[in-house]
Image (tube, helix red, strand yellow):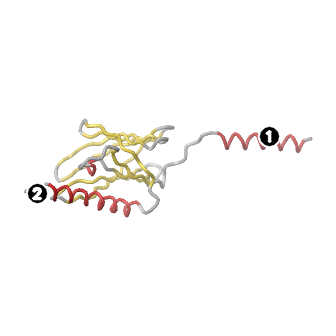
Amino acid sequence: MRYTLLKYLFIFLFSIIIFTEGQSSPVGKNLSCIADDITNKNYLKFRGVSFETDKSVRVVSLNLKNNQLKVISKLTPYKLNKNMINFKIKFIWYGNIFFENFHLDRNTLKLFHSKNKQKSELSCEIIKGNFMTEMNKKKEELQQILNKNLDDNKI
């Protein structure tokens, strides 16, 4: 009788553990995020996000200099709650200083981004490979689109 009671108690506790929704740690997860609306300037809305530690996230963006896309990477702390991950960064690009705010929905992987009072929504997907290698591949893809657009606009 005692073993039967322990067996049912074990099954009950195991069921609670299995069926309760929990949030995993974002550490070690990498995301590639881009706007859903396809435009010629999607490189301005592209972001890569890598949760390197339980306190810091690396944010990668692309900026344009002399018709070439450049990878910019910044490490910043983040705040975690049940549904959202929030972080802010300060970028300095050739003397220009700008601030960006990010809110990542943990369930939908939507990244809400604001910069200079402009807001955008990016869709993210999880990256399986090496983060910076994947960011450089994405930069090359977007550079090809940019090059095509520059060729189309020749005088």
Marked residue nearer the N-terminal end (2 or 1)? 1
* Disc 1 residue type (three-letter): Leu
Question: Which quadrant of the view contains residue 86?
Answer: top left
Residue 38, percent from left and from top: 30, 47
Residue at image point 36% right, 44% down: 122
Direction top: furthest residue: 117
Residue at image point 21% right, 58% down: 148
Q: Is residue 102 left or right of residue 126?
A: left
The relative height of residue 63 versus residue 22 in the rendered view (above or below) is below
Residue at image point 25% right, 60% down: 144
Residue 58, percent from left and from top: 37, 53
Q: Which label belongs to residue 154? A: 2
Q: Secondary structure at mark 1?
A: helix
Q: Is residue 142 left or right of residue 18?
A: left
Residue at image point 29% right, 42% down: 100
Q: Which residue is disc 1 drawn over? A: 9
Q: Is residue 75 left or right of residue 44?
A: right
